[in-house]
Image: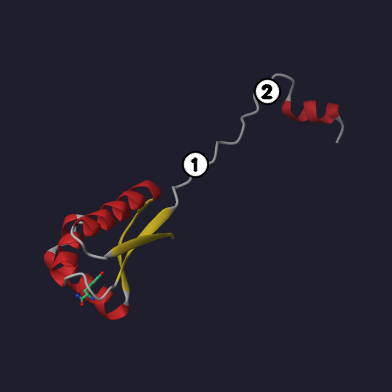
Amino acid sequence: MSDEDDHDQHGENELVIAPAKPALKQPPMHRVLMLNDDYTPMDFVIEVLEDLFSMESERAKRTMMQVHTEGLALCGIYTCEIAEAKVEQANSYAQQHGHPLQCTMEQE
Ligand code: TYC
């Protein structure tokens, strides 16, 4: 198609609307996982799950038992910055209390 044909098709003064900008992408999400160890008291783990991961008592107990029996469990899914903060808070809180409890994170 020549330039002239193109002009004919749109008309000289016709407004050509650009396609809408694609919607902003959702940020990548990250899983925070809690790992088992042989030394951290169960009640301490439950306290961390309730206070830091906002779990109800029953869910915190179930999650603690899942970590204890299966080796790890999901604590929550967050944006990268929030997940990093949760991991840091959980690990340093455990360390302050002399427990080896560890959380880690991975991208979804
Ligand atoms: N396995 C620990 C115990 O027997 C309890 C425990 C549960 C530790 C979950 C860490 O993330 C954990 N005292």
Please provide percent x and percent y for residue 92.
Answer: 26, 54
Whether pointer 2 and pointer 1 mark residues with C-beta atoms closer than 8 Å, the reply is no
Hey, which quadrant is residue 12 in on the image?
Answer: top right
Counting from the top left corner in percent of width and height, residue 14 is at 68, 23
From this viewpoint, which residue is outermost toward the top?
Answer: 13
Q: Residue at x 16, y 56 (%)?
A: 51
Q: Quadrant of residue 22?
A: top right
Up the image or down, 66 lies above or below 75; here it is below
Q: Residues within 10 Å of mark 1 (few under 14, many from 20)?
A: few
Q: Quadrant of the N terminus?
A: top right
Q: Quarter of the picture for ligand 1?
A: bottom left
Q: Position of residue 55 (x, y in %)?
A: 18, 61
Looking at the image, residue 28 lies above or below residue 103: above
Front one among 6 and 67: 67
Q: How is the image coloured?
A: secondary structure
What residue type is disc 2 on? Glu
Given residues 47 and 54, the one toward you in this image is 47
The residue singled out by tag 2 in the image is 14
CA separation in Å, label 2 and label 1: 27 Å
Q: Earlier in the sequence, mark 2 or mark 1?
A: 2
| Residue wearing tag 1 | 23
The residue at 40%/56% (across/down) is: 30
41 left or right of 74?
Answer: left
Q: Nearer the viewer, mark 2 or mark 1?
A: 1
Q: What amino acid type is highlighted by mark number 1?
A: Ala
Q: Is residue 24 visible?
A: yes
Viewer can see residue 32? no
Whether the residue carrying mark 2 lies under 8 Å from ligand 1 is answered with no
Q: Residue furthest right?
A: 2
- Which quarter of the rendered picture does the C terminus lie within? bottom left
Q: Residue at x 22, y 64 (%)?
A: 99
